[in-house]
Image (tube, helix red, strand yellow):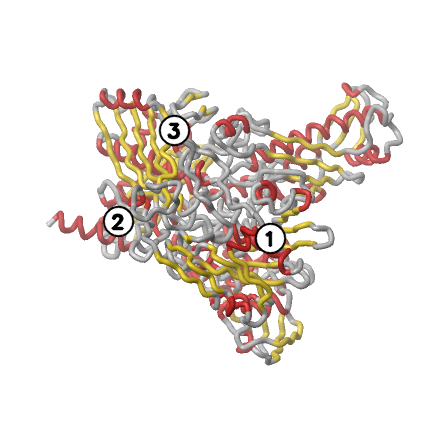
Amino acid sequence: MDNGTGIGARVKRKEDHRFLTGKGNYTDDINLPKQTYAYFVRSPHAHATINKIDTSKAKKMPGVVGIFTGDDVAATKLGGLICGWMIHSKDGSPMKAGPHPILALGKVRYVGDHVAVVIAETRDLAKAAAAAVDVDYGVLPHVVDVADAMGHKAQIHEVAPDNRVFNWSIGDEAATDAAFKKAAHITKIDLVNNRLIPNAMEPRAAIGYYDTGAEHYTLYTTSQNPHVARLVISAFHGLAPEHKLRVIAPDVGGGFGSKIFIYAEEVVCAWASKFVGGRPVKWTAERTESFLADAHGRDHVTHAEMATDASGKIIGFKVHTKAAMGAYLSTFSSCVPTYLYATLLSGQYNIPAIYAEVDALYTNTAPVDAYRGAGRPEATYVVERIVETAARELKMNPAEFRRKNFITQFPHQTPVIMCYDAGDYAAALDKALEIADVKGFPARKKASAAKGNFRGLGYSAYIEACGIAPSAAVGSLGAGVGLWESAEVRVNPVGTVEILTGSHSHGQGHETTFAQLVSDRLGVDINNVAIVHGDTDKVQFGMGTYGSRSGAVGMTAISKALDKVEAKAKRIAAAVMESSVDDIEFKNGTFTVKGTDKKMAFGEVALSAYVAHKFNSAEIEPGLKESAFHDPSNFVFPAGVHIAEIEIDGETGVTTVANYTAVDDFGNVINPMIVEGQVHGGITQGIGQALIEGCVYDKESGQLVTGSYMDYQMPRAADVPSYKLGFTCTPCPSNPLGMKGCGEAGAIGSPPAIMNAVTDALGVKDVPMPATPHVVWQQLQHLKKAAE
Amino acid sequence: MPAISMKVNGEAVCGDVEGRTLMVEFIREKLGLTGTHVGCDTSQCGACVVLVNGKAVKACTALAIAHDGAEVTTVEGLAKDGKMHPMQEAFRDNHGLQCGFCTPGMVIASIDMVNRLGKDLSEDTIRHELEGNICRCTGYHNIVAAVKAGAANM
């Protein structure tokens, strides 16, 4: 259907016109009458007691409407921020979750921690008054590096005397030890997965509004999941019951995980509105606030060992990881280094015994939570770096070592919970080898060497799991919510269609892809389909968009609701055309009666449904509107092979990505153009992590060094190449559309591909990420010295 | 507060500003043209790029009062008679945008690039010239394709 608008077509996006003409509607674009502006007083210290907050001078500043501190929040009994996934340590004890007040109470635990809020007539006045709030701090020892956090003298939460949140394990330790005893070779590696700052281009923003007449709150917010925000703010913070709180996430300018979470600032805007006479309170993060106070990603320190037998088969895998959680447990933080990480440690490989242990540790830094890939990039990094290293140590071709160990039979139960349902990893490898012209690599390497440069090739055969489900299973693992999705299909009397979905689009193009599904199923013109999302008053309930779930879970919910619409429409068509429902066929938007020339267009049936003149409304209810909740029976398992080819300038240490090939299996694809775009973006974030991006806290002062785009290097156009993509397809058996997920794969697959290429080029075991020119240049100097 | 006047997207506008009022604040808050975005405050990301007297300017780092009398084009002023500018069309045709937040600045910077360097732009040139604009979604692959196509159609 390449020229149509149905499933599989490269349909141009419906949402683009408004974005391209400046008519997007992002939170900061919204202004309400009598609006005030919030500015947050933030901790300048990594760890300190708050001895006193003096707001008297600030309160006299011009334009100040209100100043609130943690005590004010506590006085209204507003609950603290929560972590919604309970993890138990291997000794059975529950994770040690310290208090996370909306505004600090007695103590601050990272630079940027929210201490007080100043609300004023303008942003500038609020900012000026915030500078006049006098906070007396008692500075405490701090620790910012996860490697140092365990048992550090800086005790961040009383509940965790050694800073350890949990000590969690997965897999069979005894079986893994036994495998290692039989090993012909053991490969060991120590890896750091660098801390990243998500950096959606739209900073977080919120407008809270309390309607004093209706006693009702409205919160406009930059959220990937407005319903979850409403649930948490209602049920856990206790701001208002759900029917008295509307959360709207309008156009959202990128999320990458960072806009899943429930943060203090947004809750404060809603809460404070009531205390400034019901005037709306608006807050828009400055970029530095995004760096300081958005949840960060990654930050793992890992030791891994892999056992192989004499034939080069992997027989055992052991992993120990220290995972930074930051100063507080963010909304879903605890599941990231556990169930989203260690359950993927089998990679694409048939490994009979795996054991992993994770120490989650508090540090005096911004909280760490899900960032594009959330645990799976960290797992893939460990697996693909050690697999590459093992191949090199065994003097085997890294591609063939992988192939030798690939899982080939499905379903495949790994030793770490996951049951892979479908895949063809060798097919992806073959295709990637061809697209990347690996055969021509030696000649290209020689040409680079002739120029004094170093060329390297790196593989990454990633697997990931998305569409986390089913709800009962994730509940048994500690999740505080179900992970289904909802959809409602409203057919209007004229035959146009509105889809209300609990998924949320913040760049993914749902308005187009979801409409393609509807167009394909109902034969309705794609321009006659509207996708409605992001408003708790419009959509009943939904779980939002993250973890590459909106296709596999969100669209399946729509598909199920479409099934019901079709079934009802057939009954109506049968009544109108005076035939048996069993004789009604529906194809290309037309209902026909088998064996006759009777037919009705979809629009005619829709009109009949609402006019309700021609069927017995005691038997068939008027109207054409159906809803569905879909709870998947399993995760979906996208997988692929990425091959990076890099060249290092022998003089400067600058690494250039010369070629990048990604072959992915996302199952069936709705819109290849959009899927390719997701892959491009993901790869670029992964190249960013590998070569240039890194969050730095100064060890001595605890200050965030990388607090702006002057200091934190984002990938720019000249830092990356154009990409070569290929696709294989094994349809997912656990959803009717056969879809997997494509949103995070690029960011999951690419960092190890790049780093395997860098280490290949230099002939060394490890180079830390980000492999900046400075880092690589130092390696080059070591190599030169060693050669002398 | 001093009053300033400008021609924005062909219309004469005026307003009172403080000395510290930024161009982007004047455009977004006084004129209500919210297509111009603020992504970073430090002149790095380019979400705020507008054309001032025909040249690309980062509106987050320009004072409104310094541009009294200027002719300004924001993203809202690119389409003519309901038809998008060729660069806008090219971004749509090539899927050169995802969340749309960087897009207004990206499109205007691209038009400025063509105005300065002509229609025949190599991939290297496009990538280098986009150094002042950050996109977190697209990975630039399709933006580069869009700029190339848009330039050809300008």
Mark 2 lies on residue: A448
User: Pointer 2 indicates a residue of which chain?
Assistant: A
| Residues behind callouts 3 and 1 on a single chain | yes
Please say if A637 is above or below A697. Answer: above
Kind of element beneath mark 3? loop
Kind of element beneath mark 2? helix
Task: Classify residue A483 by image quadrant.
Answer: top right
Q: Can residue A549 be seen in this view?
A: yes
In the image, what residue occupies the spot 26% across and 39% down? Answer: A190
A657 and A58: which one is in front?
A: A58
Q: Residue A271 carries which label?
A: 1
User: Pointer 3 indicates a residue of which chain?
Assistant: A
Q: Which mark is residue A348?
A: 3
Residue farthest to the right?
A613
Whole-percent x, y for residue A51 in the image: 42, 58
Kind of element beneath mark 1? helix
